[in-house]
Image (cartoon, rainbow, N blue to C red):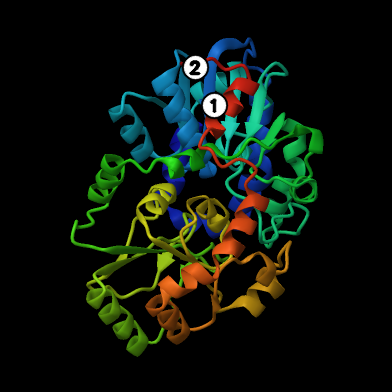
Amino acid sequence: MNLRSLFDFLRRYTFLKTNRFYIFSRGVLFPFGVKLISKFVSNKINENLIVMGAYGGETYLDNTKYLFKYLNQHSDYKLVWITKSYDVIRELNKKGYKAVFKYDLKAIKLLRSANYIFMSHGLVDVLPIKFSPKTTVILTWHGTPLKNIDVRIKRDNRAGYLFHLNLKYNNYTDFLLTATKFIEDQKLFCTALQISQNKLLDFGYPKNDILFNNEKDFVNNLRKQYEISEEIYQIILYAPTWRAETMLEFPISKETLIELNNFLEESNSIFLLKAHMYVTKINFKDYKNIRLVEKTADVQELAVISDLLITDYSSIYFDYLLTMKPIVFFAYDLKEYEKKRGFYYTYEDVAPGPIVFNGEDLLKVLRNIERIDKEYLDMRKKTRDRFNKYQDGNSTERLLKFLNIEFS
């Protein structure tokens, strides 16, 4: 049975994923075996080959998506996206882009001969193989950390913990991308991922270049893409962070939810609820002006068309600050989350917007958003300038120029 057949088998019989042997095999035996196999595959470099992946191979998003798209449009390199999603393969093929199934010998061959490899989360995006020493590996990451991401924290899953110990970022990463400006923040980031600080590139995130595109046609086309009527005056984006329970609760009473929906109708607004990619279950009742968007929807595109962000502890707000639009922090489980996960900063010091803890207060803030927008303007500017060194929409080009990747 080859890797692809094994993947399809496990996908059909999902109950096997709770088996201890499966967990151990996935976390320890599989990475070890793939790495061993890869050593027998030629590592002769193809200088024209660039390989990318994201989010454990599950979707086409984030920094690597924007790099992949840009280079497909502005370069002559051979570009390949690695994924375990058949939907992503079909989507990219339809666009005329090249995508290869992750659990395929071809993927190993491509990774062994790539001149450059870009990842958003690490080896889990592609495969835990032995890369050629001549390959340049760039970990673009996926956001400025607010909550604890320290890889030394023991995982609930022991096999997963061993996986992270055996495949440390510093062992295979040549460069780590960040948007932060100050040395103390950069040092904190590198310490959390155990990556040498001399590997850090503070060029900004390619995915944020889109936030500077305010052309009317571009914005209108995005609104049409997400089926938002021209009659809608205000778009409110709610993008909470991932929680270990994988359940997205909407902690608002039914009465307040009805009030919220009424407010949205009266103000000609729509409330878009964007769950984190790794949320698997969503407990939410549908209302006319409150809509769930697909988990695979591009949150950067939603940021462009929205007028207001509601979040909690997600790093999205560091990106959203580049738009200078208002942000509201719905931290209904702050004490519990801080105890379980922890933050690198004092939450109140780096949250440039009102912090609310229940649905009633959230609704009050939304009713007074114009006043609150002005009230927190200076704090947003200060936080934006601290966590975004560049504010020009040229992060992609800065990175490519540094790596000597040619583009037009």
Q: Position of residue 183 (x, y in %)?
A: 79, 45
* Residue occupying the point 28% across, 74% down: 264
Residue extending farthest to the bottom is 255
Neighbour tally class for label 1: few under 14, some 14-19, many 20 plus, Cα within 10 Å: some
Separation of marks 1 and 2 at Cα, in angstroms = 8 Å
Q: Nearer the viewer, residue 127 or 222?
A: 222
Q: Quadrant of residue 293?
A: bottom left
Give the side of residue 390 with respect to residue 191, left or right: left
How many circles with numbers are drawn on the protein? Answer: 2
Give the side of residue 292 with respect to residue 76, left or right: left
Q: Nearer the viewer, residue 313 or 211?
A: 211
Labels 1 and 2: the sequence-earlier one: 1
Q: Position of residue 227 (x, y in %)?
A: 22, 54
Q: Amino acid at mark 1?
A: Glu
Whether label 1 touches label 2, CB < 8 Å: yes
- SS at badge 1: helix
- SS at badge 2: loop
Q: Amino acid at mark 2?
A: Phe
Observer able to see residue 328 = no
Q: Position of residue 100 (x, y in %)?
A: 44, 27
Residue 27 marker: none
Residue 397 marker: 1
* Residue occupying the point 40% across, 81% down: 363
Give the side of residue 169 with respect to residue 322, left or right: right
* Residue occupying the point 31% across, 64% down: 234
Q: Position of residue 17 (x, y in %)?
A: 52, 55
Q: Nearer the viewer, residue 38 or 261?
A: 261
Give the side of residue 398 with respect to residue 368, left or right: right
| Tag 2 residue | 407
